[in-house]
């Protein structure tokens, strides 16, 4: 009985995975070569060259943004740390004055 149950489950799983593969192949479609219109649309246009950003300047701007973000986050962490230390010192002083 256990053998029969095991084989039916295994065959069901195998058939289920085969169906998934066939669905994936049919959904995927086939590669179609681009037509002349699509190629013309994807080609570089010399008129638009002056509006395109330069890679090096974009890279520098991104780097500056990353550095600025890190600086702001570090500043916020420092402010939180300073507030926590000041609060702890105030508590110690309050305890010291109460006991005296």
Image (tube, grey):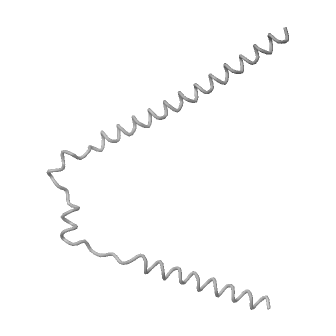
Q: Position of residue 56 (x, y in %)?
A: 30, 41
User: Is 91 situated left or right of 15 in this image?
Assistant: right
Q: Quadrant of residue 86?
A: top right
Q: Quadrant of residue 87?
A: top right
Q: Is residue 56 above or below residue 48?
A: above
Extreme residue toward the top, this view:
100
At a point 19% along the width and 56% down the height, the residue shown is 44
Q: Quadrant of the C terminus?
A: top right
At a point 76% along the width and 89% down the height, the residue shown is 3
Extreme residue toward the front, this view:
98
Q: Position of residue 59 (x, y in %)?
A: 35, 41
Q: Is residue 80 above or below residue 100?
A: below
Q: Quadrant of the N terminus?
A: bottom right
Q: Position of residue 45 (x, y in %)?
A: 17, 55
At a point 18% along the width and 64% down the height, the residue shown is 40
Extreme residue toward the left, this view:
47
User: Is 12 situated left or right of 57 in this image?
Assistant: right
At a point 20% along the width and 60% down the height, the residue shown is 43
Q: Position of residue 5 (x, y in %)?
A: 74, 88
């Amino acid at each position: 009985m256990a053998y029969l149950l095991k084989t039916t489950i295994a065959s069901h799983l195998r058939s289920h995975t085969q169906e998934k593969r066939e669905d994936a192949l049919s959904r995927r479609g086939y590669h179609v070569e681009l037509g002349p219109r699509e190629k013309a649309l994807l080609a570089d246009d010399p008129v638009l060259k002056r509006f395109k950003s330069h890679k090096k300047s974009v890279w520098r701007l991104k780097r500056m943004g990353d550095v600025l973000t890190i600086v702001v986050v570090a500043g916020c962490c420092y402010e939180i740390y300073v507030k926590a230390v000041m609060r702890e010192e105030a508590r110690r002083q309050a305890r010291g004055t109460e006991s005296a």
